[in-house]
Image (cartoon, rainbow, N blue to C red):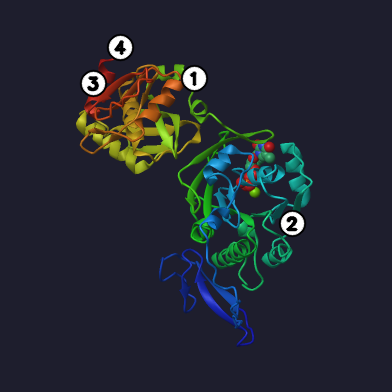
Amino acid sequence: MFFMAKGSTTTRFVCQECGAVLPKWMGQCDICKAWNSVTEEVIQKEKTKSDVPSDFFKTIAIAESDDAIRHATPFSELNRVLGGGFVGGSVVLVGGPPGIGKSTLLLQILLNKIVGIENYIYFTAEESVAQIGIRAKRIGLLNNDLKIASTNSIEQIIASTEELDEKSIVVIDSIQTISTNIIQSSSGTISQVRYCTQELVDIAKKKNIIIVIVGHVTKDGAIAGPKTLEHMVDCVLYFEGDKSYDYRILRGSKNRFGATDEIGVFSMTGTGLEEVLNPSSAFLSDHDGNSVSGVAVFSGIEGTRPILSEIQALVSHTNLSVPRRASVGFDNNRLSMLVAVISNRCRLNFFNKDVYLNIAGGLRISEPAVDMAVVASIISAYLQKSLPLHAVFFGEVSLSGEIRQSNLAYSRMKEAQKLGFQKVFCSNKTDDFGKSDINLQIIKLRSVKQIFDMIKNSSA
Ligand code: TYD
Ligand code: MG
């Protein structure tokens, strides 16, 4: 409890789970029903008078709107996700679980030259300047223009950025560890994170500087993660991947100045992050992998770029009354659905079978076109017969067991051909495009049953 003079301050009760403001303290939030999530917060009440400057309203000339120039970074994978580079005056949120490499990525960006940027500033609240120095040495780059400050006060950060002009980039690492002294709750709470982000957004817009904010997310979303901030910033990037793999995927989930759904692929090495410029070959095992049962290659599209990936399935006997359906990198509900479709359309028993699915390399796929590769890998695992060698799959599977056509078939085939594949399995509705530079054997299938027959009757 805080006792403060009435008038200057006020208290309120805020749920740390959903952000609801409640009239009094309660053990369970009225809105989201979370337990023990309501905390008291003290807010300084300050009435400020707004005076409107004479140039309050502005007009935009068409020529001027191109002024939002792109500040390209040396990482083409990052530029791709950003839509060409950082936009002046924009706020970019980089989210991701701890230890994935957010600090490493941002430090690497700052240690290189960004087009049109002269002031490089890094605020760290998690590490000391010496620790950042160790990391910079490990990456092997030193940039004397980079200024580092170790602070957790948003007031200090705002005050020290007063002098900056539009040739500046500021990184805040991380939003969960900085706080304002206006709100008395500890750093990382929803109110603190929201307030600090709003301050940063204001300064970015006012001074036209680029601000990059790091945010941690936990798997259960227990702390105030970037989810609550997504609507406040211009661009949200997620840095994801399995820590035990080398590959790290930077995924755009919101971008006011470019396309979303683009991904950038990096790999974590002993000397920092490296770009993976040809991700298709990175996510595949060597082609001999195809002769193992339960492995199918999917020709997918991430953003505008085709990426091949390996889908691995395992079907094993179980005595559990409810057999397991577990997946890594793929939606579990969709897996259950596809197993039901196979079971029903091919008359296969799955009631005493566990089904596991894995997308190799730590990739996460949500495109429906992956269905056909998933189905093929599961049937292959079930029958313990390998799929045809050097083949890729793409096509959406409907509940009726039909295979529906997917978009961008030409790009998918082109990529498969580039990587030395010889066969492509797709929907019978796939367009016959007039382009003759595809030398693959194209096998068009109508239904899940046909995939089953194809695998069953193959010689492997
Ligand atoms: P870090 O960037 O601190 O992650 P985050 O800021 O997202 O919490 O570091 C991630 C991991 O990367 C850490 O476990 C150490 C490892 N790492 C390397 O493998 N090579 C390197 O060159 C660096 C700097 C870090
Ligand atoms: Mg970090």
User: Could you classify mark 4 by the number of other residues whose Cα lies within 10 Å: few (under 14), some (14-19), or many (20 or more)?
Assistant: few
Report helix, strand or loop for mark 2: strand
Disc with the residue nearer the chain's start (2 vs 1)? 2
Q: Which numbered circle lies on residue 452?
A: none
- Label 3, label 4: how far apart the Cα atoms are: 12 Å
Which residue extends farthest bottom?
6
Q: Amino acid at mark 1?
A: Asp
Report helix, strand or loop for mark 3: helix
Residue corresponding to mark 4: 459
User: Could you classify mark 2 by the number of other residues whose Cα lies within 10 Å: few (under 14), some (14-19), or many (20 or more)?
Assistant: some
Which residue extends farthest top?
459
Q: Amino acid at mark 2?
A: Ser
Q: Quadrant location of the N terminus?
A: bottom right
Q: Amino acid at mark 3?
A: Asp
**Can you say whether 443 is above or below 353 in the image?**
above
Position of residue 42 measured from the top left corner of the image (x, y, whole percent): 59, 77
Residue corresponding to mark 1: 286
Tell me which residue sits at (60%, 83%) in the image: 49
- Whether label 3 touches label 1, CB < 8 Å: no
Task: Respond yes or no on whether mark 3 lies under 8 Å from ligand 1.
Answer: no
- Label 3, label 1: how far apart the Cα atoms are: 26 Å
Task: Respond yes or no on whether mark 1 lies under 8 Å from ligand 1.
Answer: no
Residue corresponding to mark 2: 150
Tell me which residue sits at (55%, 74%) in the image: 40
- Looking at the image, residue 54 sits to the left or right of residue 451; the answer is right
